[in-house]
Structure formats: structure tokens, C-alpha cells
Image (cartoon, helix red, strand yellow):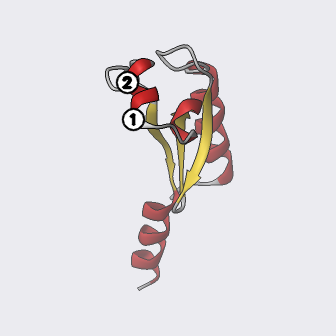
């Protein structure tokens, strides 16, 4: 099980270790479905395919990694309670 201190430590370590994406844009923490992801800030921008192509976004390796998986922790709690 994950406690609040472990979650906070994981988030702080992710921000410290990867403040920027490989493309040079800032990396930001984003929540999706009980998960916390570290993502390139450009991934949230809505841009046309032509603009992405001109900016070479199709070949850029943008940061996107799971930092905290709270959904899995919830599943373990339910199993333990059963």
C-alpha cells in the first residue's frame, strides 16, 4: 500500500529528476484516472497535424511516464479487505 509520504516523495522526485522534456518544453504533472503522470507540457496542446509536422513533434520523444498509480493501490486495498 502507498501512503501519502510515498506519493509525495514520488511526485517530488519526478519533478526534480525530469524538469524538462527532451524537446526543451517544461514537464508537468497531470492527473488521469487516479494516476499521476509526468508529461511534456506540449502534449496537452491541441495542434493541427501540419503544425506538429513542422515542429517535428512526430519524431520528438516527449516525456510521458507514470509517477503514481493510485488505481492499483485501490485494487490492493479491496483485495486486502475481502
Residue found at x 39% / y 77%: 79
Location of the C terminus (image quadrant): bottom left
Rendering coords of residue 35 (x, y %): 52, 54
Rendering coords of residue 54 (x, y %): 42, 19
Label 1 near label 2: C-beta < 8 Å?
A: yes
Which residue, given by chain and number where applicable, does mark 1 sit on? 49
Residue found at x 54% / y 36%: 38
Left or right of 27 on screen, residue 50: left
Residue found at x 46% / y 37%: 48
Rendering coords of residue 28 (x, y %): 62, 34
The secondary element bearing badge 1 is classed as: helix
Of 71 and 46, nearer the camera is 46
Residue density around tag 2, few if under 14, some if 14–19, many if 20 or more, within 10 Å: few
Left or right of 11 on screen, residue 78: left
Q: How many marks?
A: 2
User: Which residue is most to the front?
Assistant: 50
Which residue, given by chain and number where applicable, does mark 2 sit on? 53
Amino acid at each position: 500500500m502507498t501512503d501519502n509520504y510515498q506519493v509525495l516523495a514520488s511526485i517530488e522526485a519526478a519533478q526534480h529528476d525530469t524538469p524538462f522534456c527532451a524537446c526543451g518544453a517544461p514537464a508537468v504533472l497531470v492527473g488521469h484516472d487516479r494516476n499521476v503522470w509526468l508529461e511534456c507540457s506540449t502534449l496537452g496542446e491541441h495542434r493541427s497535424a501540419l503544425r506538429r509536422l513542422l515542429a517535428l513533434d512526430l519524431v520528438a520523444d516527449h516525456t510521458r511516464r507514470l509517477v503514481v498509480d493510485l488505481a492499483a493501490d485501490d485494487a490492493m486495498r479491496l483485495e486486502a479487505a475481502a
